[in-house]
Every structure is written in structure tokens, then in C-alpha cells.
Image (tube, rainbow, N blue to C red):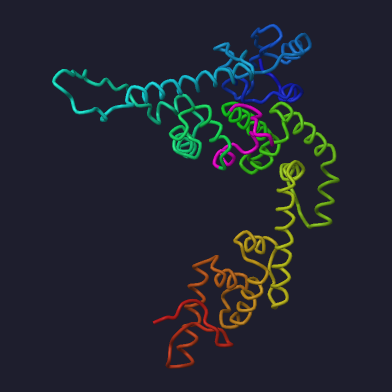
Amino acid sequence: MAISAEVLSQFSISKSLTERNAEGNVSKVFLFNPDTNSYDEATTDEDLTSYFSNNPAGRAISQNLHTNQSYGLDTQSAMAELRTAELSAQNLVNEFLRQSKDLGLYNAPTATEVFDEEEVEEVPTSQELKALYPWMTDGLLNILLDGEGGYVETGKMNVALASMRASEEYAKTFPGIAREDGSLRMTESQYYETIDVMKDTLRDYNLNPEVFQNDIVSAISGDVSAKEFAERLNFGYSQVVNNIQQVKEVYFREYGLDLSDEALFAMFISPDIADSVLQNQILVSSIIAEAETAGASITKEAAMSFAQAGISQTQAREVFGQAVSIAPGLSDMTTTAIARGIAGLDPEALANIRRGQAIRASASSPTTGAAQTQAGEVVGLTET
């Protein structure tokens, strides 16, 4: 038995929340109903459809949460647990400071004074604090303890945490988690879970989630849940697929782009990717124009390799101008190969250029030196 991708998509269920059989097919979905606080499983399309018909508030959860039956904690209780952990850490540090307050500051003992041996409790270590806050990076930990408004300065863990969460380092680590008023949209652990679910959703469409980091952050900043994110992707994909041929024809006619289905979908859901693709295409066209102006011919694929290597239009003008100038003395090399060598994209081609010009120079003059163009410009390093 297996559950089809169509039914999973219908209910916006990520494959990361399922169990798969040896063939890689989805064999089981783990379910939870917050209204009844009950757990269930579905192993067929019919089971899953029937479950959501009878349990509209139901949702798919991970196998681990289902096995431990630990999904029932809502955001409020999670924040309460976090607050309890914070207070525990604060009490631990306060007790240590109380015990060691006068350590090493005794007055000179008198004959009548007897001092008990000081019993110092264990100092809370970075590892212990990270156990309380597993999401905390080393940079955030330093701010929590030693930063402005940190625990060393204030002696209050809640103040130190608030100061840390207001820091630039925190904003870089958890972009989009804080609202404009400084309140959090979710806990840090929930943030990482949301990121993981959104990335898994993108992988379901054969998209590299690392390319969509900015879009994921924008979704979180816009209070878009992981479920709504999946629903938007599903809707967008259906719109692209239903009009795929017409959209492909427009991009090919207007920009000369022959795009795959995945590339079109990526451009549809991410303005950054769309801009990047179009800007790169403009640069490719400019490189081809510079080559043709210099008197060389170049394929679109070759021009793409120059663009991907970061060669600008101005650099392309210089490279192809020099390549055309020295090409007559290098009959065994194409102009594109020469240009790649000059641009530093092909070390072997550059070596062949230098070798060919050295042979030509030695045949026409007893003085050997740098490989030069017909105009006398040096190509590469001086030979000794």
C-alpha cells in the first residue's frame, strides 16, 4: 500500500512527515487532531482523505512527535517552558554568586574566629547554558553573558536574554523572527523547525532550498506559516504547469531563454531568481556582441561560460580584441580558445598561446622575451 503524491499535495503534506517503504514510496502518514488531542495514522489515499473529512482540524506531524505523543504543546506552553528554563539558569547563577560573594575577601582571622572551609558550587559553563538553549550560537552566548546588558552586567537572566535578542548578531542568526516591536513570532526552536519544513517543501518540487533563503525569510517576516507556504507553492506550481508552454514561448521569444519547468517555477516564486536569470542573459548577449564587434564568432554556450566566470562586458571587449589580434599566429587554436586563455579561464590554452608566440618570435628574431600581440602588447608573463 502507498499514498500518492497527488493526495499528499492535496492536503499540503511534506514527505518529511511520512514513512517510506523500501521502494521509496510513502507508506504511512502520522496524524494529530488538536481538538481531541488524539493521534492517528493513514496508510492509503482513502484513509487519508477520510481522516481529513472527519477531522478538519487534523494535521500531519513527524514520526518522532507521533511516537512520543509530544505534539500537543502549543506556542504558549512552549514559551512557558522556555521561561521556566530561563529562571532555572538565573537561579543557578545567582546561587553561585551568593556562595562566592566574599570568597578571598576575609578579614585577618583572630584567635577566637574559626572559618569553615568554603564550599563553592560548580560554575555554570557554556555547555550547561547551551543545554538550556540548544539553538544558541557561540556569538549569542558571549552577548548573553558579557555583552551590553548581559548577565555579568545586570545579574538578571531575563534582562540578558532580552538584550541578546535585541542584538544585531541575533537578527543575523534568526532573520525575520522578530516583529517591529521586538516581540517574537515564535521560539527559536520553532524557527528552525519552520525553516526545515519550508526547505523540505521546496525539495518536493526538485528545487534547491539554499537558493531560496531570502524568500523563506520573507515568508516568515510576513507571518506565513509552513503550511501556508506549502499551499502557496502548490497553487503557484499549478498555475505554472497549466500555462507552461505559453510561458516558455514568451521567455524564448523575448529573451532567448530555453528554460526547464523547474527553472520557470523558481522564477515564478522568487523575484530575486527571475532578476538574476534575466540580468545574466543580458550579460551573455553583451559578450556575444563584443566578440562579434572584434571580428570573432562565439556560441551562446561559450558566452555563458564567460558570464558565469564573472567576465564583464568591458573585460570581454579587451579579451576578444586581443584574441583577434594574435589569432593569425595561432592557426591551430580557435578565437574562443584564445580568448578563454587570455581571460584566465583555460590555463592550458594560455600555455599554448605563450608557446606558439615564443616559437614565432624566435623564428623572426634572435631576441626572445615576452609573448606579444602584433601591436606589441604582452600576453601573460615574461619568459626567461
The residue under the point 58% across, 11% down is: 69
Image position of 266 with respect to 360: above or below: above
Q: Which residues are drawn in magenta? A: 169-187
Which image quadrant is residue 301 in? Answer: bottom right
Lateral position of residue 255 relative to residue 368, left or right: right
Lateral position of residue 263 relative to residue 113, left or right: right
Q: What is the chief secondary structure element of the magenta stretch?
A: loop
Picture quarter with the C terminus: bottom left
Q: Position of residue 368 (x, y in %)?
A: 43, 88
Q: Position of residue 47 (x, y in %)?
A: 72, 11
Is 174 inside the magenta-drawn segment? yes
Image position of 205 with respect to 120: above or below: below
Which image quadrant is residue 222 in? Answer: top right
Please, which residue is most extreme toward the left here? 111
Picture quarter with the N terminus: top right
How many numbered tags mark residues here?
Answer: 0
Is 311 inside the magenta-drawn segment? no
> Nearest the camera: 125 or 112?
112
The residue under the point 18% across, 25% down is: 109
Image position of 333 with respect to 228: above or below: below
> Nearest the camera: 184 or 293?
184
Which image quadrant is residue 166 in? Answer: top right
Q: Position of residue 375 (x, y in %)?
A: 59, 87
The residue under the point 46% across, 23% down is: 90
Q: Position of residue 94 (x, y in %)?
A: 41, 23
